């Protein structure tokens, strides 16, 4: 799957459990990065966070949110 097909795919932050989505990909100094938008909820307040990380670190911090399936 190309990077363009993954933009706006639902993600889960493995550290906080927050919902997230990929908003863009880019290269800087020959290192590929991904920019992620997250919504973090703390008590009664929601925070919108933009996070940029190297693609190599992506799988350590996020996973794709698969819809719940009924069995």
Image: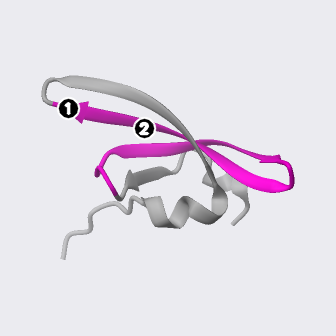
Q: Is residue 47 left or right of residue 44?
A: right
Residue 21 position, x and y percent, is: 50, 44
Q: Residue at position x 86%, y 55% from top? A: 30
| SS assignment at label 1 | strand
Q: Which mark is residue 50?
A: none
Q: How dense is the environment of label 1, judged by Cα within 10 Å: few (below 14), some, or many (20 and up)?
A: few
Q: Position of residue 33 (x, y in %)?
A: 70, 50
* 23 part of magenta stretch: yes
Q: Residue extending furthest left?
A: 43
Residue 50: x, y in percent?
52, 33
Note whether residue 62 is visible. no
Extreme residue toward the right, this view: 30
Residue at image point 20% right, 70% down: 70
Mark 1 to mark 2 CA distance (whole Å): 13 Å
Residue positioned 28% across, 52% down in the render: 17
**Which residue sits at x=32%, y=45%?**
18
| Position of the C terminus by quadrant | bottom left
Residue furthest front in the image: 29
Q: Which residue is mark 2?
A: 38
Is residue 4 on the magenta stretch? no
- Examine the rendered structure and indicate whether residue 70 appears above or below residue 18: below
The dot on residue 42 is: 1
Vertical arrangement, residue 27 with respect to residue 48, above or below:
below
Residue 10's place in the image compared with 70, above or below, is above
Dot 2 falls on a residue whose secondary structure is: strand
Residue mark closest to the camera, 1 vs 2: 1
Q: Quadrant of the N terminus?
A: bottom right
Q: Which residues are magenta?
A: 15-42
The answer to whether 6 appears left or right of 19 in the picture is: right
Residue 5 visible in the shown view: yes
Predominant SS along the magenta part: strand
């Amino acid at each position: 799957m190309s990077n363009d097909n993954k933009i706006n795919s639902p993600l889960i932050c493995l550290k906080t459990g927050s919902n997230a989505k990929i908003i863009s990909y880019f290269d800087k100094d020959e290192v590929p990065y991904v920019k992620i938008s997250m919504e973090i909820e703390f008590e009664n307040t929601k925070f919108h966070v933009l996070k940029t990380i190297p693609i190599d670190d992506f799988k350590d911090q996020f996973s794709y949110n698969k819809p719940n399936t009924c069995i």
